[in-house]
Structures are given as structure tokens and as C-alpha cells.
Image (cartoon, grey):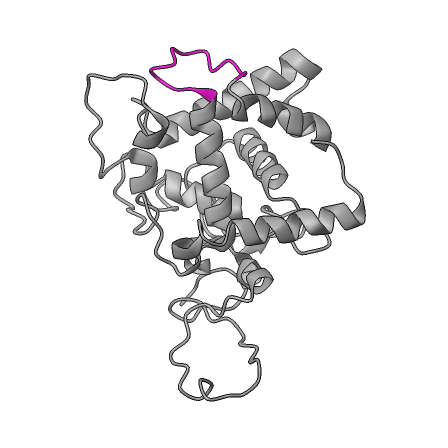
Amino acid sequence: MAEKGPDEKQFSRRDFLKTTGVATGGIIGGSLLGGFVGFNMNGDSGGDTAQNGQQDTGGDTAQGQHDPGRIFFHNDAEFETISQAMERIFPEDDMGPGAITLGAPYFLDMQLAGEYGNNTKEYMQGPFYAGETTQGYQSRLKRSELFRLGIERLNAEANEQFDDDFSNLEGEDQDEILTRFQEGEADMGVPPATATPEDFFGLLRSATIEGVYADPLYRGNRGMEGWKMKNFPGHQYQYIDRIQSDSMVEIEPQPLFGGDHNGNGNG
């Protein structure tokens, strides 16, 4: 996945936004599937931020991005690795911000600490067999465990291929590592029936897209910029004052439960 020129890169972002429209329709509307809605602070690895030693300071990071505080990723290196991986899947370009600026890593952090990360609503007992592509999530690992393993293996592959951790690599080298996971060539260090590189990449890509387009309540889609790139109006109270308009109406998006329009989800 080599670097692209301005025109090609712009086309690629537009193409991405178009082709993900159907797949993310429910996500954009706030109807997240697979346990993303309903962050459960009583999850196995959950707990509120104060109990876990992470408080929502509402401050800014050194890079100038708002930091709402982390719940699941207490290790800075792990969080940086997964953030860089998500940014390569949805990079910033001339069409708009990327996954990091949109807060997608914080969206994932919140979900991994709750029901989604703990597979609370899914049957997780044996026997375990390698699943078919049509069967959905089949790993014996919880998603939180699979993400931790995936981060470990991203760095292992990076060190084997380029003698450095994943987050320290150039973008093209990071793309090469991610492609190895996407195509099933990476070594997960566990039997395929436990987890495959495709399992991890699939979850990573889905979480990235969901973090970009979810309602800001869930700590992604910061500033509703993900919606703005699709001209999605968000959660409007009503359209009765617009439905008889003869011209195209541009609507400022509205988040669920109000919010502060900065993607913080504070209703």
C-alpha cells in the first residue's frame, strides 16, 4: 500500500466513504451491533475510570487532541500501537481527519472495557473449532484478549520485518504489516482454532469504521466530523420544517442526547 498522490488519495477517500455507506448504515444511525451499544461498567475488565486509576481530565494531549481518559488501555505503548494501526486503516487526508483525530481509539478503549470486549452476550464455551467466514466471531478468546494478542503480534511482526516496534515504523511499513494480517500471513503465535490474523484484522477494521461513524456519545466521531464527511444529519428531532423544500437542504448534524459538538458525548 504505497503512498498516493493528492488526486488519487482524494478519490480513494471518496470511494471509501461510498463503499462503506451500506455496511455502516446502522452504525451511523447509532444502532451499533455486536454489543457496541450499552457500555457496561460492570464488565469483567471494566469499572469506572476512577476505580481503574484513569480519570477523565478533559485535558489535551501533547499532540493537541482531546484526551477523555482511558479505561481499558492503561499501557501507553499498547494504546499508541492500536492508534497507529487504526490511523493507517482510516488515514487523515485532504478529505478530512483520520481515525486518531476522530477519537476512534478512545471508542475502542471504551468498548473493550465493556460488554463487547468481554463477549458478555455470547456463548463462549467449548468445543472450539475453526469457524467459517459466514459464522462471525468464533474465537475462544474474548475480544479484549484478542486485541491484546493482536497488538503483541503487530509489534512482533514489525520487529521481525523492520527491527522496530509497529508505532515507530513509517506509514508504508505499517501498511505492509497490516496487509500480512489481512491476508493471513502473520503469525499469531496460537493455533488457528484459537485465533487467526484475519480474525484480528477484521475486528480492527470494523472497530475503526465504527469509531469513526458512531454517535459521539461513544467517544468516537469527534466533532461529528465522520458524519459531516457523509453529510449525515445525525439525530434530528424532526424534519417537518424541511420536507417541503424545493431545494437541497444542508442540515447541521445533531448527536444523540445533545452533546457539546466536540465529540465528547456529554449530554
Q: Is residue 6 above or below residue 79?
A: below
Q: Is residue 67 left or right of residue 129?
A: right
- Magenta run includes residue 109: no
Q: Position of residue 150 (x, y in %)?
A: 48, 24
Magenta residues, start to end? 185-197
Q: Is residue 20 above or below residue 191?
A: below
For the N terminus, the image quarter is: top right
Furthest-front residue in this view? 246
Q: Residue at x 65, y 50 (%)?
A: 13
For the C terminus, the image quarter is: bottom left
Residue 176 in sight in this render: yes
The image quadrant that residue 228 belongs to is bottom right
Residue 69 in sight in this render: no
Q: Position of residue 159 (x, y in %)?
A: 64, 15
Q: Is residue 48 above or below residue 152?
A: below
Q: Is residue 106 left or right of residue 52?
A: right
- Most common secondary structure along the magenta stretch: loop
Q: Residue at x 42, y 56 (%)?
A: 25
